Amino acid sequence: MATLATPTSPGAVPMSCPPSMEAQSTDALPVTMTWSLPTLAGVTVERSSCAPASGTAFPIGTSTVTCSADEPSYASACSFNINITPPDPKLRFTRFLAFGDSITEGFVSEGFSTPDPLQIPAMLRAANGRGIAGISRAIQPLSAYPAVLQNLLTPAYMTQQFTVANEGRSGEKATEGAARLMSTLLATQPDVMILFEGFNDIDLALLEAGPNNTGAVNVTPIASALRSMVSMAEGLGVEVLLATLTPTEAPREASHPGTRASIEALNDEIRAMAPTLGRGGVVDIYSMLDGVPGVIGPDGFHPTSAGYRRMAEIFFAEIVSRHDVTPRAPSATGAP
């Protein structure tokens, strides 16, 4: 509704301004707005003017227009608001694929029933990365980082529809992932793939090395499989965000000596791939989770629900920094 000003003289009759107006800037630039002259008792006041004038371009935000009669003793001034809203947030891509093992699938490590500590190493070895009863819960798709990532994207970009396909497979090695990746890419048609794999290769290599081994295993074959998957995706025009492996904690090291050293060695290989990733890049999950309390569960391997959420937030921030194409108004200095 128009806002009426106090009459400028006792005999002045209040004019009626147009109602307040709203428009959206689609490019973050000012929007030209026009309106009719104010009225008095339903009759247009021809001898009146508004400041700013009709036809002015208004920036994003709320501006006030004041209209006054040429004869202020005849009619009082009135005012109304013009509100220009910013462009809708927009992301360049909407189709995402999360590809990996049980940590992508969403195996949550939270519940803990305190089995005999002497039995934990053997139990974890037998589980071979899949978790054990009393230490890791079953797969929880809604807690998995791909589901949380989609739930972060949707409200942030409400005019777009997103898919984050979860193609995690518990127990899978990177070499096995390379064998199924092409069919997955063709089926899901992603714009961007998040690649997170290699834990199970490390586990198998550690088991083969024997319990006396406490150093890092040879991670070259794992890195080679990851490079193969990156090349496969990029060959189809898919951008790859290659993630470092998450950190492990004491229970995992107790059952698999050398795990942390092997993860660090593979992560070094992954970080070294950054210059070769074309439009993609490395997302250093390890560095951002290492030492953070509550993100790795009691099995020392799988993240908790809080850990998965933090992973999703990291991927969300990376995607936004790379692909947010929402128009922005030029800065005051004239820089884009």
Image (spheres, grey):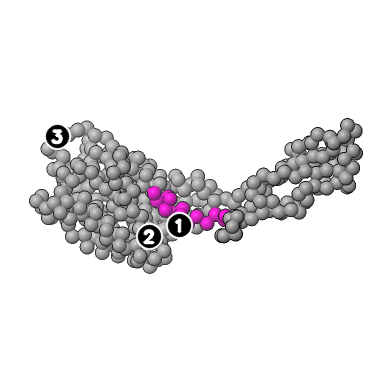
Disc 2 or 3, which lies upstream in sequence? 3
Report helix, strand or loop for mark 2: strand
3 or 1: mark nearer the eye: 1
Q: Closer to the camera, 325 or 96?
A: 325
Span shown in magenta: 314-328
Is 82 placed above or below 217 here? above
2 or 3: mark nearer the eye: 2
Residue type indicated by callout 1:
Arg
Q: Residue at x 44, y 54 (%)?
A: 319
Pointer 2: what residue? 281
Q: Is 254 part of what is drawn in magenta?
A: no
Pointer 1: what residue? 322
Residue 21 position within the rendered picture, expressed as x and y whole percent measured from the top left: 71, 45
Residue 2 position within the rendered picture, expressed as x and y whole percent measured from the top left: 76, 39
Q: CA distance from mark 3 to mark 1?
A: 47 Å
Report helix, strand or loop for mark 3: loop
Q: Closer to the camera, 310 or 132?
A: 310
Q: Tally the numbered discs.
A: 3
Q: Is residue 36 visible?
A: yes
Q: Are marks 1 and 2 in contact (CB under 8 Å)?
A: yes
Q: Are marks 2 and 3 in contact (CB under 8 Å)?
A: no
Q: CA distance from mark 1 to mark 2?
A: 10 Å
Q: Residues within 10 Å of mark 3 (few under 14, many from 20)?
A: few
Q: Is residue 186 left or right of residue 117?
A: right
Residue 242 position within the rendered picture, expressed as x and y whole percent measured from the top left: 34, 57
Report helix, strand or loop for mark 1: helix
Disc 3 or 1, which lies upstream in sequence? 3
* Residue lying farthest to the left in this orientation: 212
